[in-house]
Amino acid sequence: MTAIAATPALGYFKAMVAHGNGGYAEDRQRQADTMKEEFSPESMTALLEQASRLMHGARFASGLTPAQWTALRYFAEAPPFQKTMASLARFQGLTLAPVTRTVRTLMDKGLVDRHPNPRSKRADLIIVNKAGRQMLNQNPRAQIAEVLAKIPVEDRVVFVRSLRTTLDGLLELGLPQFDESLLQYDDE
C-alpha cells in the first residue's frame, strides 16, 4: 500500500473529517491567527534582531573584530585616494580616534601598511598588504552571502525592498545616516 504524503491539504481534509465543516473553518482560523503572529511587526523585529546578532557574531572571525573587518574591507575596496583614515571615519560616521585605533591594530597585526599620499602630506594612504589580502580570503561576510544565496531569486526582490524600507525607517528615527557622497573621490 502506498503512503500518502503529508500535505497541508491532507491536514485540512483530516480536520474536516474529524470536526465536520466547522472544524475546517476553525482550522483555517487557527492557521490565519498563527500567520498573523508569525508576520507581526513584533515577530519580524525579533527575527531581524536574532539575524543581526548572528551576523555580528560571525564577524568575530580569525582574530579580528567587526570594526577591524570593516576597515580591512574598506581599504581593500575603496578608490585609491580614499584609502585614508579620515575617509574611513566619514564612511563609518565615526570620529577619527576610534578609526585610528582600529588602523593601528591592523598595522600591528601586519595586515595594512602606511604609505605617503601624493595628494596630501597630512593623510597617509592605508594599503592592504599581502597578509591582509590573505586574511580577506577568510572574510566572514562571504559566509553570510552564501546563506543569502539560498533565498530564491524571486524572493530576493521583496527581501531587498523590505530591508531598504526598514533601513529608511530606522534612519527617520534619527539614527546615523550613510552618506553616499563618501563613495566619491576627494582630495584630502
Image (cartoon, rainbow, N blue to C red):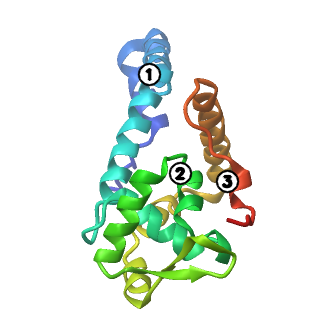
Image spot of residue 135 (x, y percent): 37, 80
Q: Is residue 13 visible?
A: no
Res 128 label: none
User: What residue is pinned by disc 3?
Assistant: 154
Q: Earlier in the sequence, mark 1 or mark 3?
A: 1
Q: Earlier in the sequence, mark 1 or mark 2?
A: 1
Label 1 vs label 2, nearer the camera: 2
Q: Earlier in the sequence, mark 3 or mark 2?
A: 2
Q: Quadrant of the C terminus?
A: bottom right
Is the residue under label 3 in contact with that under label 1 (CB below 8 Å)? no
Circle 1 SS class: helix
Kind of residue indicated by mark 2: Gln
Residue drawn at x 48%, y 25% is 35
Q: Which sits in the foreground, 14 or 61?
A: 61
Res 42 label: 1
Image height of 90 relative to 37, above or below = below
Circle 2 SS class: helix
